Amino acid sequence: MSQIVRTLLATILFTCFAAAASADETVDVARAWGLIGTWAADCSAPAVKGRGAIISYEVTPAGRLIYRRDHDPSDVNAVTKARIDPDQTLVLLIMLPKAKQTRENGITRTSDGGIRSLFNRGEDNSYTIRDGRFVANGNPTPVLGKCG
């Protein structure tokens, strides 16, 4: 086997293992922070497609972290990275295929065990949430409690 073929095979194997390790790390970070599960402002309210009132962070059978809104099977987004900042903000990098964009979402834990978004920004540094408030109307982001 030539050196080029061996190098190519080694590169492919390394890439596969690195991708798997990255996915495992993302799940591990989210799990350690306590994010895995379904969250809503009112867990008894029915899901309304497109409203985003119920969100779930789930681990797929393949071991990947996904973000789903309103129990909608067509609104599934890959969480490709997760980190915990020194102030304990969980920062997620989420790929949104429907919107054809990647967004970074910062989440904080509230004193009562809920969560709320502190920021949501695109790759172009455009914010939909900044300092815990929706940019469009200035309203604070809701506190979500864990369902079930």
Image (cartoon, rainbow, N blue to C red):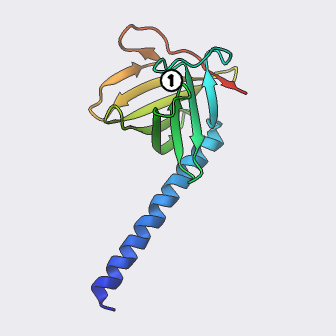
- The residue shown at (41%, 8%) is 138
Image point (63%, 43%), residue name: 31
Q: Is residue 41 left or right of residue 103?
A: right
Split into 4 quadrants, where in the image is the C terminus? top right
Q: Position of residue 66 (x, y in %)?
A: 52, 41
In percent of width and height, residue 132 lies at 47, 18
- Residue at 44% of width from left, 14% of height from top? 133
Q: Is residue 79 above or below residue 135?
A: below
At x 35% / y 11%, what residue is drawn? 136
Front position in the image: 140 or 42 = 42
Q: Is residue 90 visible?
A: no
Would you identify the image quadrant in which residue 50 lies? top left
In the depicted structure, whether residue 28 falls above or below residue 47: below
Percent x, y of residue 128: 37, 21
Q: Which residue is mark 1?
A: 117
State the residue in front, 10 or 82.
10
Above or below, 23 against 148 in this view is below
Quadrant containing the N terminus in the rendered view: bottom left
Answer yes or no: is residue 137 visible.
yes
Identify the image quadrant of residue 62. bottom right
Q: Quadrant of residue 94?
A: top left
Q: Position of residue 16 (x, y in %)?
A: 44, 65
Indicate whether 139 appears above or below 46: above
Secondary structure of the residue carrying tag 1 is: strand
Q: Which residue in the rendered view is the most extreme toward the bottom?
A: 1
- The three-letter code of the residue at mark 1 reads Ser
Tag count? 1
Q: Residues within 10 Å of mark 1 (few under 14, many from 20)?
A: many
